[in-house]
Image: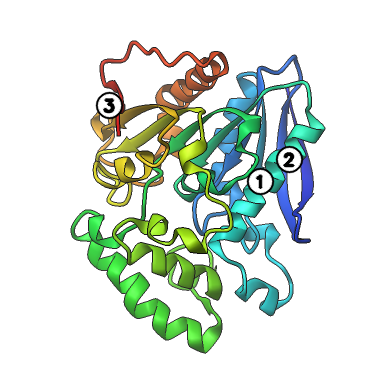
């Protein structure tokens, strides 16, 4: 049996974040913080979160400031949100979980930006391990063709036109993602127009712990994801110099599918295969034992 509890998490700078706790009613294996992707809402990940809870975990599914139920009423408060603010949110949720569940180990799952920003969290040492799903750098010209043309348009044509006029990017009307705050999309644009992404701007980062993180990390990406690919995923992971990293590349054919892309691993179509793999990963991370039997898995030396 699973209990769902709506929560509000207050960040150090006063934002209120909306979330849901999926509490396993037996003795939990661990507490899992589930970080969503850019411009997404938590409801997209709800079935996945509940599946994890049904398999013995307490799961916290939540939204960054500006997204879904975490969107402030004041347009000015919305427009000034940045990517680095989302790292503050990740930190706040982890602190909340550590206070609420002091007796249980903490794990993290991050989709896309939700894994990418791990190195900006000063409290990362609370974690016992992390699973990254399609997390990578965002440099647009390393995206697969022809998707990179869409990325160029998004960052270098649409953003400069919309943000000065509106103060935000109206991505929801264009059915791309949720609307993005002006300051956030401009910061993201700067990163995505740099060869080494945010790592080309170390002086602008409020906190930078990538080289210090010693967690076991499991990173997945799919062969048909134009964003997180064989170039961009290693380009992120190499900055976790002290982490024990294992990667696995997934192919749509592995699941009997024609495509997976950047979001398909959260579809119930892969529930009996990939979601079960993640449960096994979480259990393995708790022991810090990254020896796997899957021949597709490889140790990364970056």
Query: What whole-number distance in Å separates the C-alpha atoms at marks 2 and 1?
Result: 6 Å
> Which quadrant of the figure has residue 104?
top right
Look at the numbered discs 3 and 2 and tell me whether their residues touch, using CB distance below 8 Å: no
State which mark lies toward you, 3 or 2: 2
Mark 3 Cα shell of 10 Å, populated few (<14), some (14-19), many (≥20) = few
Instruction: Identify the residue at the far left of this view.
Output: 145
Q: Are marks 2 and 1 in contact (CB under 8 Å)?
A: yes
Residue at position x 41%, y 27% from top?
274
- Percent of width and height locating residue 222: 30, 38
Q: In the rendered image of this protein, does residue 3 appear above or below residue 143?
A: above
Percent across and percent down for residue 46 are 59, 40
On the rendered image, what quadrant is the C terminus found in? top left
Residue at image x 77%, y 21%?
Answer: 103
Asked whether 215 or 222 is in front, the reply is 215
Element on which disc 3 rests: helix
- Of callouts 3 and 1, which one flags the residue occurring earlier in the amino acid sequence? 1
Residue on which the image places disc 3: 254
Residue located beneath label 2 in the image: 95
Q: Residues within 10 Å of mark 2 (few under 14, many from 20)?
A: some
Identify the element where label 1 is drawn: helix
Considering depth in this image, is 165 or 258 the residue closer to the camera? 165
Vertical comparison of 250 with 117: above or below: above
Residue at 32%, 42% (x, y): give it. 233
In this rendering, the label closer to the viewer, 3 or 1? 1
Residue 20 relative to residue 287: left or right = right
Q: Residue 87 at x, y = what percent?
A: 59, 52
| Element carrying mark 2 | helix
**Location of mark 1 (residue):** 91
User: Counting other residues with Cα less than 10 Å from the Cα at mark 1, is it few (<14), some (14-19), or many (20 or more)?
Assistant: some
Between 238 and 254, which is closer to the camera in this rendering? 238
């Amino acid at each position: 049996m699973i209990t769902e509890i709506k929560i509000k998490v207050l960040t150090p700078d006063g934002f209120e974040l909306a979330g849901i706790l999926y509490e396993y009613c037996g003795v939990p294996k661990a507490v899992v913080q589930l970080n969503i992707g850019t411009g997404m809402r938590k409801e997209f990940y709800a079935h996945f979160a509940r599946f994890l809870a049904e398999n013995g975990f307490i799961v916290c599914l939540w939204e960054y400031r500006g997204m879904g139920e975490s969107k402030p009423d004041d347009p000015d408060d919305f427009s000034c949100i940045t990517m680095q603010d989302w790292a503050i949110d990740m930190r706040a949720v982890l602190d909340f979980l550590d206070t609420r569940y002091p007796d249980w180990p903490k794990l993290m799952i991050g989709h896309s930006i939700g894994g990418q920003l791990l190195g900006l969290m000063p409290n990362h040492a609370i974690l016992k391990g992390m699973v990254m799903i399609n997390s990578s750098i965002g440099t647009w010209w390393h995206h697969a063709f022809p998707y990179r043309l869409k990325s160029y348009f998004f960052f270098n044509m649409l953003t400069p036109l919309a943000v000065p006029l509106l103060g935000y990017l109206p991505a929801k009307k264009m059915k791309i993602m949720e609307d993005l705050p002006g300051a956030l999309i401009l910061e993201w644009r700067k990163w995505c127009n740099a060869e080494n992404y945010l790592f080309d701007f170390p002086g602008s980062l409020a906190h930078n712990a990538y080289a210090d993180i010693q967690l076991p990390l499991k990173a997945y990406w799919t062969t048909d994801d134009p964003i997180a690919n064989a170039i961009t995923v290693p380009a992120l992971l190499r900055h976790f110099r002290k982490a024990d990293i294992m990667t696995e590349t997934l192919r749509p054919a592995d699941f009997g599918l024609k495509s997976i892309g950047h979001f398909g691993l959260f579809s119930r179509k892969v529930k009996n295969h990939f979601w079960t793999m993640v449960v096994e990963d979480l259990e393995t991370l708790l022991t810090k034992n990254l020896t796997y039997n899957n021949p597709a898995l490889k140790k990364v030396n970056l």
